[in-house]
Amino acid sequence: MSCVKNFARKAALLLAAGALPVVPAMAQEAAQPVSQTVPANAPRLVVAIAIDQLSSDIFAQYRQRFTGGFARLTSGAVFPAGYQSHAATETCPGHSTILTGNRPAHTGIIANSWIDQSVSVGPKLVYCAEDVAKRTAGSRDYVASVKNLLVPTLGDLLKRVNPAARNIAVSGKDRGALMMGGHDIDQVYWWKGKGFTTLEGRTLGATAVAQNAAITATLAKGAPAFALPAWCARNDRAIQAGTATVGTGRFALKAGATDAFRVSPRLDRATLDLAVKLVDEEKLGKDAVPDVLSVSLSATDYVGHATGTEGAEMCIQLTQLDLALGDFFASLDQRGIDYAVVLTADHGGFDLPERLHEQALEVSARVTNDVSPEALSATLGKRYGLEPKDLILSDGASGDYWVRADVAPGLKGKIVDDAKAMLESNSQVEVVLTAAEIAATPMPTHSPEVWTMAERARASYNPLHSGDFVVFLKRGVVPIPTPRAGYVATHGSPWDYDRRVPILFWRKGMTGFEQPSAIETVDIAPSLAALVGLKVPEGSFDGRCLDLDGGAGNTCGAAK
């Protein structure tokens, strides 16, 4: 059964119960391939790039320093105030919006992971890009899959119209590649362990084998540190966060240090090198049918988590990324491909409190254990005479929380109300919203920068996966109680430092412009669909088509 048909079946059951919000037409209909004429002026290759954890704030901070790939893109259509408008600003939901044109409420990807108490094998925590049905008892691993994505991507839609279209995805993370590539991917690769891997049941293509061989050679001999640009000198200062010291790193690579390769600019360079090799192998952009190449670059996120956003490490990372993107675009130019690019991010990011305290943000803090599911379980278990273990479940100290499934419905409601009251009395908590409150909130249609917390939560809410209540911490409270080496800073909040991301479109010869007004990442897919002449049923997208021509023309097809 196809994902679309499978979701249609689930949707029918939930709609009958009044539990499912209205979903886009393409999520409920298994559209058959229909021949469509590709406009003569359509690009032959769509390149969609996601920079994991590239916030609008950090893009603005570094924009004047870019001389490579970013500088090229800023000559196109620039939307500095793009929004991952939903509340759950994590990698998986963010990637799921970019090429589906739908918010997590409709993609079904409400977070990187969620609790499913019906799971019979392994933990109740379900990873967004796994096939739970393929779990095996005792295994700590999972089978990567796009099964949880409930809507098609741009690549899926193009292949329905013309199976000759190629849909290729590469990333430093499986969830980045799968959520952008979708269900019908010709080749898909992501970093795992010591090199790139692919879906279960597939073999690595010659290009991936060659790329892995190059990585193996680098790992065998190591590599020197990167130079710190002179203008980054003010960032070069040691900061202590728990047992971790950050702020002065240079990414020197010792022989065999695979994790150091992953958490460095080298991962992005390797991902882009693989993408170029796949362009050649698949002959992307060389025929009359538009192809899609999705590239998710993960190193900025890994560096952000490990060292924060304001140290020497991030300065080096963004400088090297800019150069790598420049080389990537030059490689496409050399191949004579007519390509269009969109670059955005899956979410933003926030620096570590220990450094923010020295940079005029004294209110920043780390979350205390009072907000944890364990603390709630202990208090509420004692109050109601219930076994406290796993009475309240979550995947961290914010976001979705669940009440244990064996609690009677009437008592469950009391526990949710009590948990809400307890948490909202906590000075670190902004608001707690119950599933009923979120479901009753209309899906917002106005500009995302003025959405209420309930509206942000609504864009992330899907009854198939969402919790019984959602906890939002106050602005500046970081949901990492105890920092450690490799994990000192994060994202995931409903605040704009995590929601705002740049959105840049570029194509050779286009009339560029800058539009500071807010748009959403769900506007990307309908805009690209119009650019390649792809016609889809009304209501297929949550987003709208953006006119990417800064002159008299209109890429959405309507006259100005």
Image: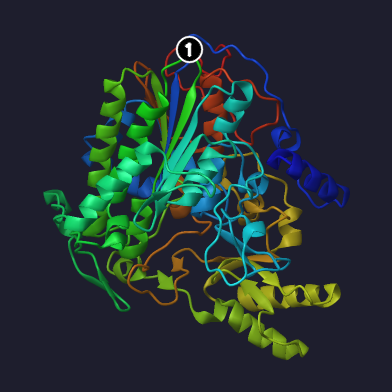
Residue at 75% of width from left, 77% of height from top?
415
Which residue occupies the foreground of this view, 490 or 477? 490
Residue projecting furthest to the top: 40
Secondary structure state at the residue bearing disc 1: loop
Q: Quadrant of the N terminus?
A: top right
Q: Is residue 453 above or below residue 321?
A: below
Q: Determine whether, in the image, residue 124 is placed left or right of residue 493.
A: right
Q: Can you give x and y, in whole percent of width and height, for residue 312 in the image?
A: 21, 58
Image coords of residue 254 (percent x, y): 19, 62
Q: Position of residue 275 (x, y in %)?
A: 36, 36
Q: Is residue 462 above or below residue 381?
A: above
Q: How is the image coloured?
A: rainbow
Residue 520 percent across, percent down from the top left: 53, 39
Residue 364, image quadrant = bottom left
Query: Can see residue 499?
Result: no
Is 420 drawn above or below residue 68 in the view shown? Answer: below
Identity of the residue drawn at 68% across and 73% down: 420
- Number of numbered tags placed on the structure image: 1
Kind of residue at disc 1? Gly
* Nearer the observer, 272 or 209: 209
Quadrant of the drawing holding the C terminus: top right
Identify the residue at image location x=66%, y=24%.
Answer: 536
Question: Which residue does the numbered mark 1 point to in the structure image?
Answer: 553
Residue nearer the viewer, 430 or 537: 537
Indicate left or right for 184 with 33 as reference: left
Label 1 crowd (10 A; few <14 / some 14-19 / many >=20): some
Residue 413 shows up from this direction: yes
Outermost residue on the right side: it is 16
Residue at (34, 56) in percent of width and height: 194
- Left/right of residue 13 with respect to residue 189 in the rendered view: right
